[in-house]
Image (cartoon, grey):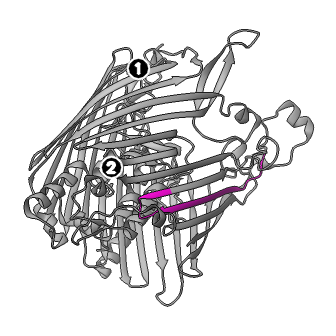
Amino acid sequence: MSRELKFVSFWLFIMSLTQMLMAQQPDTLMKNLEYQIEWYVENTENELDYSELTEELEQLSKNRVNLNSRERDELKRLFFLNEAQIQGILAYTANYGDFVSIYELKAIPNFDSTLIRKIIPFVTISPYEKQHLKMSEALKQGEHSILLRYQRILEKQEGYLPADDSLLEVKPNARYLGSPDKILVKYGYNYKSQIRWGLLAEKDAGEEFFSGTQKQGFDFYSAYIYGRDLGKVHRFVLGDYHATFGQGLVMWSGLSFGKAGITGGMPHTARGLTPSSSSNEIYYLRGGGMTIGLGNFEISTLASHIALDAGIAALDTLQTNEIIEGLRNTGLHRTPSEVDLSKNIHLTTLAGNINYTGDIFKAGFTIASENFDKAFDYRTGLYNLFQQPRKSQLTMGADASVYLRDFVLQGEIARDIDGHLAGIFNVNFQPDPRLTLALIYRNYDKAFQNYHSNAFSENSGVYNEKGLYLGFKASLAKQVELSGYADYFRFPWFKYRVDGPSKGREYYLRMDFLLGKNAHAYLRYRFEQKEINISDEDRKLNFLFPKKFHNVRMHFDYQPLVEWKFASRAEASFNHPNAVDSRMGFLIYQDITWKPTRLPISITGRYALFDTDSYDERLYAYEQDLLYSFSVPAYYYKGQKFILVFKYSLNKSLNFWLRFASSIYSDRDEIGTGLEMIHGNSRSEIKGQLIWKF
């Protein structure tokens, strides 16, 4: 049987199975988060630690937000709501008094039944009384948590094979310095999400541990102290933290889900100063910041001084002057060459933001100064002509939002030290409670530079792009929802492997079905076209060809019994890299979760089959993992994968997880490249985790 026929057969099997179950699993924010992480990794190939988001959802479920609060900062704890929705809640209570039922939210624009169902676990309704912090209580009655995690690849990889001294003398980077063990230790304290502090230590696989180049123990340490709603001090943070203001053109050091956030319900909403509690060794600031409230005004200031990995070179034989050859953002220090790049340079950031919030209007101004302690080397290549990194940067920008009943208008414009501009403008329109329309226009100069920019874009950075995004979300019936977008973009200057100005487009369409009380299904189609270099023997120069990519997915979640949950997916990709070749890939998997009501355990398993013509047709899928751990690997080549996750609750305070995953390839005898190579056709990983909360 051909693989195309197998794919169709499995698809039809899932459809018939769903008809038998006829059951909608309530749409949850955690499901949304899984979808957005999956999308983010698919588009960026960055597998990061997203535990900050799951930790916040967990704390929200324990310390719910009172919708009758008249405090904007309290409502902003619902970080999955946008500014217009928060403003709508405040306007409703100001005009009509306290909420009596959560379903009164239906009277507020931008709140539909789906969103209301999602936020129910995180909100409460009661007469609101502002709580004044008692420091003695905050220091004694909060929750402590300790997390210990261990993981490793079971097969021997090239970097850990025995090597004699003669080989290492000639090729010192031929082996990793440390063991294949990855270790994470994490401690946190939380009092009603108002007072928090934490400490984290991590060792990556291949890094040394309390020996050699890592005599201090772990390779990465992180700590923070955070306070919120302390009178005039709305927020303060010391240690590692994030800062997000405006639309992200001047200062946005945290994650941004981009298109996935818009379509998936996690909007690009600035949250000001927040702690960094993840193990990510990028996308954070180190120092301190504070936000002061003065009536309708908020004033934030921050300072950061952080060491970064980079390659450096001497300008003279005396090595008195050095330049930066390039930054390195992996955070890995496994070989002598990687250790040599460790913390070679320092970045100092000073920034401030002032914003005013009225009933229907919000405006802000942000300024950021960034200074490296060394200058950058000149980058070759035409695509780098307008992106020569500066030793010092100064960026300032203004943002504004207007909230009308059916319209939300938002925008930001920024200017760098050389006068190059970047701007973004978006409109959200709800002509009917069942229909929401969105428009986003962005225009980023090809020479715009700012290290901490992280705004909506198709490009890898906020520069050299013009684009128009048109999106919608519609409730076609009580149990059918349709969402989608069309995004058109142009790159006015050269890009890497694109020798000329280029353009592209992307279309996305998703239909969700609520099939009863305990089942949910969706169909998704995605198309992307981008111009890339193509070489031809008859031509001396490369020419641009519109590479096309299609993706189609069918996904089902269903729970026929209280103790059993199932998830099924069938997905295919079709790649047309040039005018001649056509390649395909497909993925099918089945998840099963058993959580007995009378036993303190849960077991989740997955069996997946995948087959792609090449790496370019790879497919990404979110995998069940340990709590606060995330796995969204790429499935490519031909093979199968098994996953088993076991959880045991020793008591209410102590929980243990164990995860085993194994991929077996049928079309190759070696997996991976370089020091990550496995001489065999299987790759297996084991993870264990213990969490104690008291």
* Tag in front: 2 or 1: 2
- Please state which of residues 97 and 529 is positioned toward the viewer in this rendering: 97
Provide the secondary structure element on which disc 2 rests.
helix
- Can you tell which mark lies on residue 494? 1
Amino acid identity at mark 2: Gly
Query: In the drawing, does residue 634 fall left or right of residue 296?
Result: right
* Label 2 with label 1: CB-CB less than 8 Å: no
Q: Quadrant of residue 337?
A: top right
Residue 654 position within the rendered picture, expressed as x and y whole percent measured from the top left: 58, 76
Look at the image and say whether residue 180 sits in the magenta stretch: yes
Amino acid on which disc 1 is placed: Phe
Residue 213 visible from this viewpoint: yes
Q: Is residue 442 visible?
A: no
Rendered location of residue 541, percent (x, y): 46, 15
Q: Is residue 489 above or below residue 670?
A: above
Q: What residue appears at the point 30 percent right and 49 percent down from the top-left corner?
A: 267
Q: Secondary structure at mark 1?
A: loop
Does 180 sit left or right of 345 as displayed?
Answer: right
Disc number placed over residue 261 in the picture, else none: 2
Crowding around mark 2 (Cα neighbors within 10 Å: few <14, some 14 to 19, many 20+) is many
Magenta region's main secondary structure?
strand
Residue 627 is left or right of residue 17, and the answer is right
Q: Is residue 616 above or below residue 377?
A: below
Q: Which residues are magenta?
A: 178-196
